[in-house]
């Protein structure tokens, strides 16, 4: 499936890093949700690139503790990002992310590929601020 999402670039990386860290820790979404006191659906929404839900700083702290991280930087992007709000075109692979486990080589399976990244134009950004720009648009199957 090909989708286009409009998102804060840092939020996108946090979503991906939470999923990656959870799977590396050997937890499914239910187990992580129970450890931090939120619903399984909430974790699923945060990890889902098609859903605008995001993790606030308090939740990031709770997730870092639950996953026994040494630093919050294990969830945050590895470098400073140059963009704020971006339009990402993604190819989503057909995998079950809820109970996902490491592959035979001990790696977290890829669930998406970034096909393109565009910084919003001023006009698009104003529409985004007015909450009239759709978060997710399905481009194709």
Image (spheres, rainbow, N blue to C red):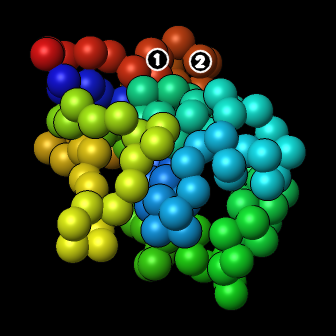
Is residue 49 or residue 121 the one in the foreground? Answer: 49
Horizontally, residue 34 falls left or right of residue 90, namely: right
Q: Which residue is drawn at 19% across and 47% down?
A: 113
Residues 17 and 138: in front is 17
Res. 123 image quadrant: top left
Residue 39, quarter of picture = top right
On-image quarter of the C terminus: top left
- Using a 10 Å C-alpha cutoff, classify the residue at mark 2 as few (fewer than 14 neighbours), some (14 to 19) or many (20 or more): few
Q: Position of residue 32 (x, y in %)?
A: 68, 51
Q: Residue at x 28, y 45 (%)?
A: 111
User: Observer-nearest residue: 41 or 140?
Assistant: 41
Dividing the picture into quadrants, the one containing residue 139 is: top left
- Which residue is painted at 70% across and 77% down in the image? 68
Q: From the top left corner, tell me how far across and down residue 105 is, in percent.
A: 21, 73
101 relative position to 28: left or right: left
Q: Residue 60: where, in percent of width, then height? A: 72, 60
């Amino acid at each position: 499936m090909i989708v286009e999402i409009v998102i804060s670039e840092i939020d996108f990386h946090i979503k991906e890093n939470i999923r990656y860290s959870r799977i590396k820790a050997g937890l499914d979404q239910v187990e992580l949700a129970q450890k931090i006191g939120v619903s399984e659906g909430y974790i699923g929404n945060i990890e889902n690139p098609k859903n605008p839900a995001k993790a606030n700083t308090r939740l990031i702290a709770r997730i870092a503790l639950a996953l026994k991280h040494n630093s919050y930087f294990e969830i945050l992007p590895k470098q400073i990002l140059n963009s704020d709000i971006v339009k990402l075109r993604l190819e989503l692979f057909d995998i079950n992310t809820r109970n996902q486990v490491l592959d035979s080589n001990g790696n977290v399976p890829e669930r998406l590929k970034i096909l393109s990244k565009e910084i919003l134009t001023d006009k698009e950004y104003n529409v985004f601020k007015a909450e009239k720009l759709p978060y997710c648009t399905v481009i194709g199957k």
